[in-house]
Image: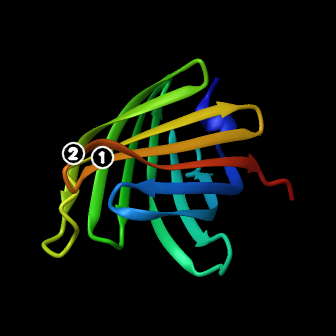
Amino acid sequence: MNLLDVLPGAWVGTGDGHYPTIEPFSYRERLTFAQLGDKPVIAYTQRTQHAETAAALHVECGYLRVDGDRAELLIVQPTGFAEVHHGILAGGVIEFAVTALGRSASALPVETVRRRWELAGDRLVVELWMTYGGVIDGHHLRSQLRREHA
């Protein structure tokens, strides 16, 4: 499976968020991937809305650099975080490990972030874990997305 062939386009669906320090919530998510010319780089944008009120919840953007089955994910968030991840695509799954996590002076004291993407045809499952508030590697988000067809 070549990420440059399978990711580009829009992926939409729903997800659930939870963490010991917050009330559980549901959301709608949209991921957009666009290859940058003939370079092995994909521009990435993510947006979430509250499932019931459609209020904006989160946005992030960045790039996915692809080299065969290896991937580097670079993300910036308006919440004050910059993430650098690396992963290897195996069996349709990328387990991203954080290489670097930077945060601004006013950002929450999140210590680590871990991401996982599972691709199967027109389905993409996205998950996120973090270490924050005394919870080590706590599962926080899971969304199930489908490729949006024009």
Element type at mark 1: strand
Image marks 2 and 1: residues in contact by CB distance under 8 Å: yes
Q: Give the position of the N terminus as an image quadrant.
A: top right
Q: Give the position of the C terminus as an image quadrant.
A: bottom right
Question: Where, by quadrant of the figure, is residue 105 drawn?
Answer: bottom left
> In this rendering, is residue 56 above or below 33?
below
Q: Residues within 10 Å of mark 1 (few under 14, many from 20)?
A: many
Please name whichever residue, 105 or 39, is drawn nearer the observer in this view of the structure.
105
Query: Residue, x 67% and y 57% (percent of image)?
Result: 14
Q: Specify the amino acid type for callout 1.
A: Val
Q: Is 42 positioned to the left or the right of 132 in the image?
A: right
Query: Residue, x 68% and y 35% (percent of image)?
Result: 5
Residue 108, numbered label: none
Query: Residue, x 54% and y 61% (percent of image)?
Result: 46
Image coords of residue 97 (percent x, y):
32, 34
Query: Residue, x 64% and y 61% (percent of image)?
Result: 30
Does the rendering let one see residue 11? yes
Q: Residues within 10 Å of mark 2 (few under 14, many from 20)?
A: few
Residue 84, numbered label: 1
Sequence order check, earlier mark of 2 and 1: 1
Image coords of residue 125 (percent x, y):
62, 41
Q: Which residue is mark 2?
A: 100
> In this rendering, is residue 11 above or below 46?
above
Q: Is 147 positioned to the left or the right of 31 in the image?
A: right
Question: Where, by quadrant of the figure, is residue 3 drawn?
Answer: top right
Element type at mark 2: strand
Question: Where, by quadrant of the figure, is residue 88 drawn?
Answer: top left
Residue that sits furthest to the top in the current view: 91
Image coords of residue 39 (percent x, y):
52, 43
The CA distance from mark 2 to mark 1 is 5 Å
Q: Specify the amino acid type for callout 2.
A: Ala
